[in-house]
Image (cartoon, helix red, strand yellow):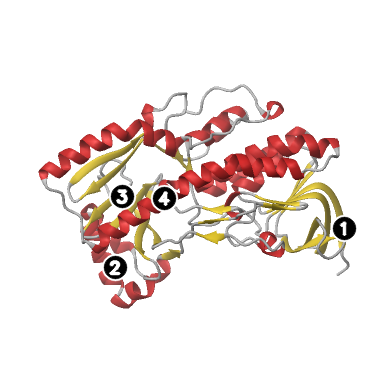
Amino acid sequence: MQETTRETTCCIVGGGPAGVMLGLLLARAGVDVTVLEKHADFFRDFRGDTIHSSTLDLIDGLGLRARFLRIPQTSITTLDIVVGGTRLTLVDFRTLRGPNRRIALMPQWDFLDLLAQEARTLPNFKLLMETTATGLLHDAPGAAVTGVLAQGPGGPLRINATLTVAADGRDSLARKAAGLQPEGLGVPIDVLWFRLPTPPSPPPDTLGYLRNGTLLITIPRTDYYQMGMLIPKGGFEAIRAQGLAAFRRQVRTSAPFLSQAVESLHDWEDVKLLSVQLDRLRQWSAPGLLCIGDAAHAMSPVFGVGVNYAVQDAVAAARLLAPPLLAGRAVDQAMRQFQGRREWPVRLMQPLQQQVHKAISGAASANHGEMAPWQARLATLGSKAARPVVARLVGRGFLPERLPGPAAAKSSPVS
């Protein structure tokens, strides 16, 4: 097929939360934007589905509250963990200031559809589905990036762009093509994801259950639990070798109320491995290219902040990049300012995630899962004292971003 050429000011590779949010905000500011998404739709399972308070604030500012609330979702105001038989409230979002004091649990494809529908109302926004980036364009070897080579439903594409943004995740092709290599921080755990039906009389919403060295994550959905079992890094094959019956027994031991629900697991195809990564780039940009979201810093599932940090990246990038792009000026300084602003919240959060990894690994190796009465009382007091601080760090992060002026709209809070 003959190659088609397109012209745009900003080409964003990747239609995840970072890419679509950035495309929407740049287009609202007047920048011509093209977003490439390799899949035919946004429907992918086992993606980050937590919409934290910081992102709910942005939904308010975008004027999308009413449409957001029409999407099926569940809402949690605390994050509890049951250690043996002792329930601890680790995070209480009701202690937050401001209107949005909860986490919304919503399939990520619904969230992306909402943003994409809004963006498509803008004449300078183009979302190309089933379009895969295959390489970067340069005027000469070693010169600045000048766009993207891609393959779409109609054949090969050549997309010339003033700025290219890599928002294509932790295995970013655009980042790799630019020669940018992330530094791994080391992760001792992986996660097994699966679904279980909600039992007839479920307990209060609970983040997880720790017993006999197994931490089981239980995320409530509208009619099922999104489950996660934390396992040692690379340990999935050993678990499979023990058989599905042993796996179901491990789930029942950790969370007895799921004893009947776990029988719905009939095959290992129902259990998916998430290989946990934690890394970040030393340099988030190259001439003509900027990395955001997981392409710049892969976060672990701990606290569920990955989606929200990616969205915060998009907001900061839009605010800093729109003025020079609209004026036809170079964006190198804006890209450096972006990294300087967004790098330090990542550098603060990732070590906290590492500490949680170590604590989980330590509990598993020591076969923890029961607490003496005095330990339970001490842990309860400690968790109560820390709740406001932890709620702030988890719900809004170290540096919640504000929408660029033209993008913001007055709205009632998302409740």
Whichever of labels 3 and 2 marks the residue nearer the N terminus, that label is: 3
Give the Cα distance between marks 1 and 2: 52 Å
> Contact, CB < 8 Å: mark 4 with mark 2?
no
| Disc 1/disc 4 C-alpha distance (Å) | 43 Å
User: 404 or 246, which lies in front?
Assistant: 404
| Rendering quarter of residue 329 | top right
- Residue identified by numbered label 4: 353
Residue 247 is labelled as 2
SS at mark 1 in the image = strand
The first of marks 3 and 1 along the sequence is: 1
Q: Mark 3 points at which residue?
A: 208
Q: Is residue 73 above or below residue 41?
A: above
Where is residue 64? Give x, y as percent: 60, 31
Real-space Cα distance between discs 4 and 3? 16 Å
Q: Does residue 214 appear in the picture of this structure?
A: no
Asked if residue 384 lies left or right of residue 111, the reply is: left
